[in-house]
Image (spheres, coloured by chain):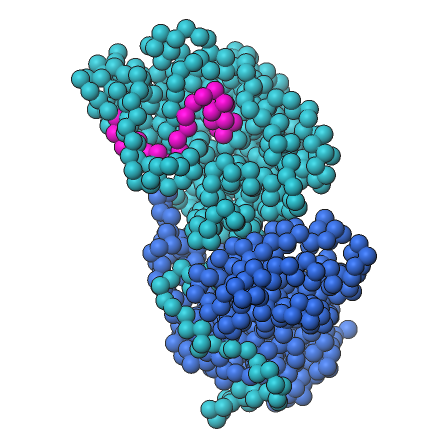
Chain colours: A cyan, B blue
Amino acid sequence: MRGVDVTLVEKGNLTHGTTGRMHGLLHSGGRYAVADQASAKECVEENFILRDIASHCVEETGGLFVKRPEDDESYFQAKLQGCLDCDIPAEVLTGREARAREPYLADDIEKAITVPDGAVDPFRLCVANAAGALDHGATVMTHAEVTDILVEAGEVVGAEVRHGDGPRTSGRQPGSTDRIVADHVVNATGAWAGRVGAMAGVDVEVRPSKGVMTVMNTRQVDTVVNRCRPKGDADIVVPHETACILGTTDEEVDDPEDYPEHRWEVDLMIDTLAELVPILKKARTLRSFWGVRPLYEPPGTGTEDPTDITRDFFLLDHGDRDGLPGMTSIVGGKLTTYRMMAEQISDHVCGKLGVSAACRTAAEPLPGSHDIGRLHEMMDEFGLRSPVSRRSAQRLGSRTEEVLQTSGPNPVVCGCEGVTRAEVRDAIDDVGAELNAVRLRTRASMGTCQGGFCCHQIAAELAPDHSAATARTALDDLYQERWKGQRHALWGEQLSQAMLNHMLHATSMNRDADPARFDTEVSYDAFDPGRPTKETPVAADGGRPDGSEDRWR
Amino acid sequence: MAITSDVLVIGGGLAGVTAAVSAAREGADVRLISHKHSTMQQASGLIDALGYLPPTGDDAELTPTAGRTGAMDQRATPEGPLPEPFAAVDRLPEGHPYRLVGAEALRSGLALFDEMVDSYHGAHTDRNALVPTFGGSVKPTARYPASVAGGLASDGAPMLVVGFRSLAAFDARQVAGQLRETGVPFSVAGRELTLPAGLADDMTPTRVAHALDRDERLDGTPARAALAALIEPHLDAVKGGAARVGLPACLGDERVEAVCEELSDRLGARVFEIPMGPPSLPGLRLSDRLYESLDEAGVRYETGNPVVGVETDADGRVDAVLVDRKGTEIPYGADGIVLATGGLVGKGLDSDREGVREPVLGCHVPHPAERYEWYVDDVFGDQPYARFGVATDERLRPLDAAGGVQFPNVHVAGATLGGADVAREKSASGVSLATGVVAGRQAAKVAATGVVG
């Protein structure tokens, strides 16, 4: 947007790291209004900007900070005052008023503070940003992992990337490498920033901290519900699309890609948050997932508990800081302030490059966000049944017409989430045969059945452009990914669902033992060639041809 | 007022019906009660007996980690597809229902099935058949509907697979491509077609089945003729011309065989069905047929009311179960009881974060106390949860935690039994038939002799 030639590289698909593994809260800043007011102010400012520029990615749910009898009254007052200090619109509700708004709140909730929390779809938001970047001439390379930062004569001059197997790498062999030369390199890799820094020989002290998020089958609440107490695990319920997400824990980990996922974390979510919303104890849990916060604190701060580390972000110019010009890292922060972080790093880089154009991202809508009024017309125009059409339109924003304008039948491919063929095909056109990326764009396979009834239907949409073998691998990957999160929700109805999925995929489709996936050759001759055509009384070997006795007679 | 019978069967799926008919054939007065519709509409309608010996022994890990994905390429090769089901029974894990009742019970179960359901093929041989699946693979099965018979993979006749654009269940081009990769001994091509107006708009398999069953007029043309005309130009898509045409299993309801025959005549190629997922027409047809055989065997049955309690004597013998009929608890007394309430899918097994239960009688269900040992990371691995169910003695009487018989006059059948991963073994229906026959006979014996155990 400012005339700079930019290449974005990402090791996985978009949102591969922490962005795709968050609870979907668009912060009002209320959470930080007591202990971290600088972050709180940034949050509320950005919250209102995102409602404008990314309206199709944000649901304005509002939020509540609720107080239980055992929660500290002085903290409640401090929270209220903190919100007012930070210009976060806040009002106090009585327990009765709070329950009138959210009927499933516990009877002993005493009171609540309303704040403008919201729900944000990080996938849609990230894709919309990438689409905007492409529109303005940027290059976006996914599945391109940085393997080295190029340093020449004491200066960063670019990066080496290794191409993987995935979309947007067309023309480049998986496993091949590229050297991308740049005037300036931005390290915006979150929890991975330390690793990328190390490639250039600089220390970036990120402190990755994991948190669990547990997905419920339906929206037990329509408002973000926070617990009003200083800090603690399991203190938020975020309504998100068709589900609710419970969060979270905060535990430092060594490796942002490999850390234990504990049962106690899941149990804690359900048991503790049931104190706010008792029905959660009996509700159906679909899956759990973990994300890793990219926390950062300046060297020497030495905070012990990751919960106390600031949520603020930091811009580290390695020229100033480490005597290594040509690279800047941006660390810390949170999704709600992503745009502000991007603006600051862009300002910084533009300053280095002598570009004087101003940043316009706070005012210019992201692709799909403008003209929201058209959405409802789209429903009628494409003759789609509500709520499928309504949800398609919500997901697609102002791209609805373009995407749904297809010839031929447009059946629902994912019944739980109401995703039609046109949407799935549109996503496949965009990302290729990577069905996890299709899932993130469309929400297909993210509902109650966790893909059991639709993964194969999504894979069927790969025909005829992709081979049967490609489709099979893509299906395996998606089905396995869906299983990964369900492992943390295997009881009650979801265990029954898992068994039903197992029966459908192993029994009815024989996907587990498909001869196509193993080396063994099938001797087709050894099997039943069919009933003899000349009908003779059937020689029933349901009898006992070997003369053995039936001991049950 | 108590309702009594010699034998009471709880559960109306394949195992329950088999047990009821088998007990009735022993001369017992049999009553069957079923709370909900059976899960048969979710099953393909194929009668699998035993098709694979899947690899066993994946470690259940206590703590998953973010880095572990359970990659498929690490999976051991299953033994199979097995050309016939009986010989491999002895090599199944100990405690498997087939190990308890033996291959002869499977033969008896299949024989009874053949008598109950005359529209199925497969009884002419001991061998398994390989049938194309809607996922584009082939799978071994012991009995298959006549409407499916044209698709056998051991037949070398060139095949055209047809899909409908308005049905998202599969893409025929992809199914054909997948079939080729399994090494099938015939040439195969796939074509995706758009159904005539009137069906295309709001197509469900059931809707199409009814239109074909009744041969409804679509734009003035009878549905069967219209469908044949749609397919006819594509027969040459296969090298040498298609000798058979596979369609999603929605070719009719009661009159599916007549529909297949008419379509075959019109096309000059055998038209067959590829069994699908839910809602499965072949599963529904089979369910209907089985309920007819209950009538034929003189079994009284009722559906819709749950069992809410149980009355036992001092020895653990179940005298009666309490059935909730519109808010009133009615005791249903019987000498012999068959428990065939299904597994995790049919709600014959229930669970929460603390454990797994058999909710109707409270039979003991062995399972790891640690919930994170109920699964393994590979979705198609040796999943402990898939084997959950009641453990029994050889007479299918439930065992308590100490290994003693928990209810001496109760016999357990079908998916309620533990010890089998019927999905990977392709043995679900066979287990229901074999244990259904044995449980039914055992319960009838209890009723006739008054002796339990």
- As drawn, A487 above or below A182: below
**Residue drawn at the location 59% of the way across and 78% of the way down:** B121
Q: Which quadrant would the N terminus of chain B be assigned to in this image?
A: bottom right
**Residue drawn at the location 55% of the way across and 78% of the way down:** A530
Magenta region includes residue B62: no
Residue lying farthest bottom? A547
The quarter holding residue B433 reads bottom right
The quarter holding residue A87 reads top right
In the image, taking residue B415 as reference, residue B401 lies left or right, namely left
Please name whichever residue, B212 or B289, is drawn nearer the observer in this view of the structure.
B212
Residue B425 image offset from top left, x and y in percent: 46, 68
Residue B190 image offset from top left, x and y in percent: 55, 58
Residue B430 image offset from top left, x and y in percent: 53, 75
Q: Is residue A541 visible?
A: yes
Q: Is residue B101 visible?
A: no
**Residue drawn at the location 62% of the way across and 27% of the way down:** A398
Residue A441 image offset from top left, x and y in percent: 52, 36
Please name whichever residue, A112 or A427, is drawn nearer the observer in this view of the structure.
A427
Magenta region includes residue A142: yes
- As drawn, B352 above or below A232: below
The quarter holding residue A5 reads top left
- As drawn, A213 above or below A158: below
- Magenta part of the protein: which range? A126-149
Number of callouts: 0
**Residue drawn at the location 44% of the way across and 8% of the way down:** A357
Please name whichever residue, B329 or A242, is drawn nearer the observer in this view of the structure.
A242
Please name whichever residue, A222 or B112, is drawn nearer the observer in this view of the structure.
B112
